[in-house]
């Protein structure tokens, strides 16, 4: 009976904290694996741009308004908006 409470507490901790974090991590990794040239991204630092080319662990983006080219780490990408043409 004395071991039941700590085991129950560990189970609740897993369901409320650890599992959602693992799910977010998997989604983020699949997002990074799916990036391609032409996608609009936002970095963790708040820089927005369009992907020009991809390297193994880096991405070259074009940033408005002066069309600056920046090389950033792939892991710095916070969100991706895929360019889709609407007809």
Image (cartoon, rainbow, N blue to C red):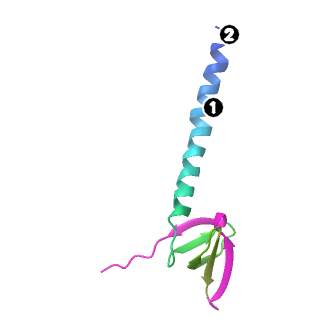
Identify the residue under disc 2: 2
The region drawn magenta spans 65-87
Q: Residues within 10 Å of mark 1 (few under 14, many from 20)?
A: few
Who's the residue at 56% across and 34% down the image?
Answer: 15
The disc placed on residue 13 is 1
Q: Position of residue 50 (x, y in %)?
A: 56, 79
In 3D space, how far apart are the residues under numbered discs 2 and 1 (Cα atoms)? Answer: 18 Å
Q: Position of residue 84 (x, y in %)?
A: 40, 76
Q: Position of residue 28 (x, y in %)?
A: 56, 57
Q: Position of residue 76 (x, y in %)?
A: 66, 66
Cβ atoms at labels 2 and 1 below 8 Å apart: no
Who's the residue at 65% across and 63% down the image?
Answer: 75
Q: Is residue 80 magenta?
A: yes
Residue 21 versus residue 11 in the image, above or below: below
Residue 1 versus residue 83 in the image, above or below: above
- Considering depth in this image, is 71 or 48 the residue closer to the camera? 71
């Amino acid at each position: 009976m004395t071991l039941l409470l700590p085991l129950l507490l560990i189970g609740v901790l897993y369901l409320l904290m650890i599992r959602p974090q693992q799910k977010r991590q998997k989604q983020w990794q699949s997002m990074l694996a799916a990036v391609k040239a032409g996608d609009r991204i936002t970095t963790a630092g708040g820089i927005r741009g369009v992907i020009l080319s991809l390297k193994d662990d880096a991405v070259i983006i074009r940033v408005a308004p002066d069309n600056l080219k920046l090389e950033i780490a792939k892991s710095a990408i916070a969100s991706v908006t895929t360019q889709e043409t609407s007809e």
